[in-house]
């Protein structure tokens, strides 16, 4: 059923910057159509003041005045012929999409340990024997155990950690479980357990 006189948003022209609303867009279109250059400029200043009230959070940006004029330039489809009070040559950068962030492509052997552990085990492979390597191996082993508990369905097997560390370092780091003592790690976070009880 079609009702005469009704104007649906779906049938209207798509707004370039919907946050300012259709009325601001109509004002800009009107300003573009004005024959007098000074009148267009006077109108543009009034529109920018209106835009500022429509989007008050714009004040949070450092140079919000420049941003408003850039937006006006874009919303006029670059057709507003005035003496711009700001340089609007960089306005189009607002709509350029950022370059995609490259994701690490390297396949990890044991994903539940994470990238940090992989980096530590690579470093352990290149370190000379000594106290510094032993300290890093201890920290790495303890972190691996915490990761295993968190991501390995609560497993706390010391032998598995020692075996995985040896595999990841190509056999260079061999933990002697008779002398090596892991830090005490709880399978369930006591604080989280306390919060559940309170509910």
Image (cartoon, grey):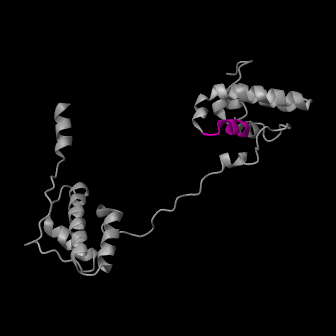
Residue 154 lies in the magenta-colored region: no
Which residue sits at x=63%, y=32%?
Answer: 19
Q: 70 or 31, which lies in front? A: 70
Left or right: 37, with 179 as reference point: right
Which residue sits at x=72%, y=48%?
Answer: 90
Q: 33 or 93, which lies in front? A: 93
Residue 143 against residue 134 in the figure, above or below? above
Residue 154 x %, y %: 18, 55
Residue 9 x %, y %: 67, 28
Q: Quadrant of the C terminus?
A: top left
The answer to which quarter of the image holds residue 33 is top right
User: Does residue 77 appear anywhere in the picture?
Assistant: yes
User: Does residue 30 appear anywhere in the picture?
Assistant: no
The overriding secondary structure of the stretch rendered in magenta is helix
Q: 22 or 1, which lies in front? A: 22
The answer to which quarter of the image holds residue 191 is top left
Which residue sits at x=28%, y=81%?
Answer: 128
Q: Look at the image and give the residue range highlighted in magenta.
A: 62-70
The answer to which quarter of the image holds residue 136 is bottom left
Q: Which residue is outermost to the right?
A: 35
Residue 100 x %, y %: 56, 57
Residue 185 against residue 16 in the figure, above or below? below
Left or right: 32, with 100 as reference point: right
């Amino acid at each position: 059923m079609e009702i005469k006189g009704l104007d649906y948003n779906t049938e209207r022209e798509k707004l370039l910057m919907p946050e300012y609303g259709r009325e601001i867009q109509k004002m800009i279109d009107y300003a573009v159509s004005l024959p007098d250059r000074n009148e267009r400029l006077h109108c543009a200043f009034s529109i920018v003041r209106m835009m500022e009230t429509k989007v008050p959070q714009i004040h949070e940006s450092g140079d919000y005045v420049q941003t408003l004029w850039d937006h006006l330039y874009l919303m006029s489809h670059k057709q507003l012929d005035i003496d711009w009070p700001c340089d609007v040559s960089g306005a189009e950068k607002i709509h350029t999409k950022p370059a995609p962030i490259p994701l690490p492509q390297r396949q990890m052997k044991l994903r539940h340990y994470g990238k940090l552990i992989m980096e530590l085990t690579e470093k352990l492979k290149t370190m000379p024997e000594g106290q510094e390597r032993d300290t890093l191996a201890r920290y790495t082993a303890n972190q691996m155990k915490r990761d295993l508990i968190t991501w390995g369905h609560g497993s706390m097997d010391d032998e598995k950690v020692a075996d995985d560390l040896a595999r990841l370092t190509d056999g260079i780091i061999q933990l002697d479980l008779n002398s090596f003592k892991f830090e005490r790690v709880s399978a369930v976070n006591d604080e989280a357990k306390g919060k559940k009880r309170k509910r």
